[in-house]
Image: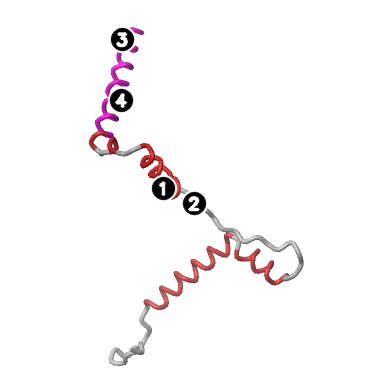
Amino acid sequence: MILSLLFLNLFVGVVIETFNKEKETLSLNSMLTNGERDWINVQLLGYRAKPQVRIREEQHNVSCFRNWCIKITNNAKFDTFIMGCIILNTIVMGTEWYDINPGINYVKD
């Protein structure tokens, strides 16, 4: 019983290794040099990175108003509020109001 599980595990490992080799060969990655592979890996790491820019408050009390604005804009509720304003503005701009005259061009060319 244990011997059959060992051979089954070995067989699955060989099948997976063969599949990975064939996939590498068919994708033409085998033609890349080591430097090119390193460059591709660095590019992939750069695309996966999700940096977040945070403006730090000044330690000196030069501008209390600036520090207050930074505190507000770094808050997650501020982002939600701004997104809500954008969505509400889009809905309002997309609606038609009562007694609109279709013959008048409201947009200046």
**Badge 2 is on which residue?**
50
Residue 50 falls left or right of residue 59: left
The alpha-carbon separation of the residues under discs 2 and 4 comes to 33 Å
Q: Nearer the viewer, mark 4 or mark 3?
A: 4
**Badge 3 is on which residue?**
4
Q: Residues within 10 Å of mark 3 (few under 14, many from 20)?
A: few
Is-magenta flag for residue 29?
no
Up the image or down, 56 lies above or below 1; here it is below
The alpha-carbon separation of the residues under discs 1 and 2 comes to 13 Å
Image mark for residue 17: 4
Q: Amino acid at mark 2?
A: Lys
The alpha-carbon separation of the residues under discs 3 and 1 comes to 44 Å
Q: Tell me where residue 67 sits by quadrant.
A: bottom right
Q: Nearer the viewer, residue 50 or 21?
A: 21
Q: Tell me where residue 53 sits by quadrant.
A: bottom right
Q: How is the image coloured?
A: secondary structure
Image mark for residue 43: 1
The alpha-carbon separation of the residues under discs 4 and 3 comes to 20 Å
